[in-house]
Amino acid sequence: MEDERAWALEESLWTGDLAVHGAKIDTACLMVVPTGPWIMTAEDALRRMSEAPRWTRVAFSAQQISRPAKGLIVLAYSAHALRDAGHGYATHCTSTWRRHRHGDWRLVQHQQTPAISG
């Protein structure tokens, strides 16, 4: 997968709806987020995402991409996301994508560390 597509997939998880999440998050995915329950399975994450308002915009910076093995892509970046109500969120993330089959990539790991200001 080319870099532009990898970043577009990542952005779709921030701004997409539950159908996007269900199609792109692997059933074996594990996530670590900065609020309880902190460590989640794919099922936990999908349930939580269905209850939370979506981000309307996200901007990535300090983007890095690695391909440690065939069919595996690791993204590291900083994100600043906004909701319609003006609520902003700044974080540092990693995501790991695995090729499920040709042209079909699934998220198998995602981690967020909130940006500390000061």
Image (cartoon, rainbow, N blue to C red):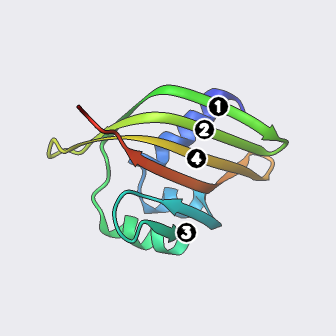
The answer to which of 47 and 116 lies nearer the viewer is 116
CA gap, disc 3 to disc 1? 23 Å
Task: In the rendered structure, find residue 95 and report the number of the disc placed on it.
Answer: 4
Residue 55 in the figure: left or right of residue 2 = left
The type of residue carrying mark 4 is: Ser
Task: In the rendered structure, find residue 75 and report the number of the disc placed on it.
Answer: 2
The type of residue carrying mark 2 is: Leu
Q: Residue at x 60, y 56 (%)?
A: 109
The answer to which of 102 and 53 lies nearer the viewer is 53
Whichever of labels 4 and 2 marks the residue nearer the N terminus, that label is 2
| Mark 3 neighbour density, 10 Å: few (under 14) some (14–19) many (20 or more) | many
CA gap, disc 4 to disc 2? 5 Å
CA gap, disc 3 to disc 2? 18 Å
Asked if marks 3 and 1 touch (Cβ < 8 Å), the reply is no
Residue under circle 3? 42
Element on which disc 3 rests: helix
Whichever of labels 4 and 3 marks the residue nearer the N terminus, that label is 3
Residue under circle 1? 65
Q: Quadrant of the C terminus?
A: top left
Q: Residue at x 79, y 39 (%)?
A: 68
Q: Residue at x 50, y 34 (%)?
A: 77
| Mark 2 neighbour density, 10 Å: few (under 14) some (14–19) many (20 or more) | some
Q: Position of residue 23 (x, y in %)?
A: 58, 60
Q: Position of residue 105 (x, y in %)?
A: 69, 50
The type of residue carrying mark 1 is: Ile
Q: Is residue 30 above or below residue 69?
A: below
The type of residue carrying mark 3 is: Ala
Asked if marks 2 and 1 touch (Cβ < 8 Å), the reply is yes
CA gap, disc 2 to disc 1? 5 Å
What is the residue that sits farthest to the top in this orientation?
62
Whichever of labels 2 and 1 marks the residue nearer the N terminus, that label is 1
Element on which disc 4 rests: strand
